[in-house]
Amino acid sequence: MSERTRKELLLQYPGVSPFAILKADMQRRAITYTPAALALVDPAIHQVEYVGYNIDKKDLAIPCSLLLRDGSTVMAAPFPGKANPYVIDALDGKPAIFDGGEYVEAAEYWYKPAYYSKTTSSGKPMWQVISARPQRLDVNPYNFCHFWDNGKGCKFCAIAANYHKHKHEKELALDPRDIAETVAEAIKQPGRFANILLTGGSITRGETPFDAEVENYITILKAIGEAFAAPRFPSQLIATAFNEAQLERLRNETGLMSYTADLEVLNEEKFNWICPGKAEWIGYKEWKRRLVAAVGVFGRGYVNSGIVGGVELAQPHGFASEAEALDVTLTEAESLAEQGVSVVNCVWNTLPGSVFHNQTVPSLEYYVRLAKGLQDLRVKYNLNIDMDNYRRCGNHPDSDLAR
Amino acid sequence: MPELEELLRGAVVTILATSDDSGTPHAVRKAHITYEDGKLLVPERLESGKTNSNLVHSLWFGRKAALLLLLGDGTSFAVQATPLRVHITGPLFERFYRQAPVAAVWELAPEGVREETAAVRAKEEAAAHPLLLHLDSIAKGATA
Ligand code: SF4
């Protein structure tokens, strides 16, 4: 597959949203902000991150991320070492996206939710308890992954590096009461949130492996549930692939509505290399089997699996060609779709602190074909992806196409 | 011709027509469309509905929508409009949401207003195409 530009791909794939193509390219190439674009940031209104961030010291405020005109979220950030990022500049007093000096699209900074200025009864700033996306509350109750206990975490993942970097200022685990209070406060803002996501690192402990992780999520989901009049609330858990008994507990004891267990890479041999902890504790075939079992518990359209599209091409053990990687990935995604499990893609970022930080990401065309291929499978097997769509998540170019 | 803002205020029925990727049209009655800063603001209640989907795809692929306004005095007006942007979060979205739960607020750019009242259109077409009629309609003693 030769490297085609975004403009060429727009012509070659006229049925694919130009916004999804732009988003995928911004994610793989990263972005940078000009001083004029940063001058438009108002931390009183916008949701920001601080460069050189720590709890006590706030340096330069940069926008958390961007929104496009079609309501798509672009989770992209400045990224050291990226040679050719998209540039966010100011145009007529508004943020705009430029590529090679040429105007591409308008952009909007995310708005800060009202709860960000509140504190919990324990005195914790709520923005430190739960972060927000444009329509989602992101709860990360556990900031370490025990697949790293013996160094077998996923090779694209930086959770362990981030944990060690921030462990003096960020606790390992959140207090469920702080989470519950923050959710209760956040949902007072009319129209601001449509989904609650829970995700964190794998906790291997327990009588049956991962019982401790399940228990933690049950405690938190029950506490969150106190804020709702209905027994179930729009929510997604991205977690380890649990066994049937653990899944039943999550379904029966909490208001959870959808479940995700990320296979990350859709090939057993590459999975074993890239996700050795998942391979050691559960294994590729069993992970898949558990996803299908989860459909029996949560229902069709309420279970999916995330992949980090492109990692299957990492070297030296990844696929040698994009064509082969795509073919294998979509064939495997089809076997899951047939059984009611949707696959969603996250564009691979070679994160600093991850084993794969020096790798090269695939072409934009790879992501366009992957997005189209995954969405075509959902259409073929009549799988809806409301649980992880442009609004309830916003990080998957493929589910952006489901609108 | 009255201003668009005035027409929207006076409309007793407003119909929004959109189309999908295959060109299939879809028309629905829409309430609460407003006009602000030169743009039409269309609140959409159903996130998964056909109108919302058609507007998203119209924004992606450069298609237009059409609005038909029926006024209390029997006149009607048509407006073509280009989807510019959808608000699914943020201050404008929340302003509409507080009035009534909505899934989205669409910003459409109106492109000219055309009167569609039957008698007015008949007069215009008769002037532009005098050959296009049936002879009996102009026969001596014809009533129409
Ligand atoms: S399972 Fe893999 S991707 Fe998930 S937190 Fe652990 S190491 Fe990271």
Image (tube, rainbow, N blue to C red):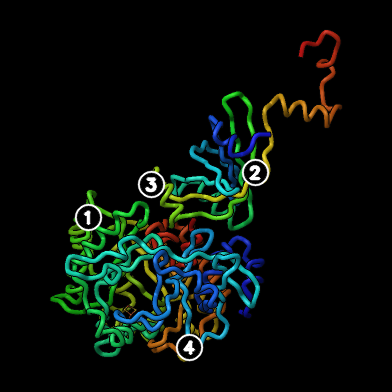
Camera-side residue of A97 and A271: A97
Question: Horizontal placement of A208 versus A78: left or right?
Answer: left
Chain of the residue where label 2 is placed in the rendered structure: B
Chain identifier of the residue bearing label 3 in the image: B
**Res. A93 image quadrant:** bottom right
Q: Is residue A340 visible?
A: no
Q: Mark 2 and mark 1 in contact (Cβ < 8 Å)?
A: no
| Number of residues whose C-alpha sits closer than 10 Å to that of mark 4, classed few (under 14), some (14–19) or many (20 or more) | some
**Amino acid bearing label 2:** Gln
Callouts 1 and 2 on one subunit:
no
Of the pair A159 and A289, the residue shown nearer to us: A159
Name the residue at 46% across, 50% down: B104
Are the residues under marks 1 and 3 on the same chain?
Answer: no
Disc 1: CA contacts within 10 A as few (<14), some (14-19) or many (>=20): some
Residue A57 higher or lower than A105, as above or below: below
Q: What residue sits right under mark 1 in the picture?
A: A227
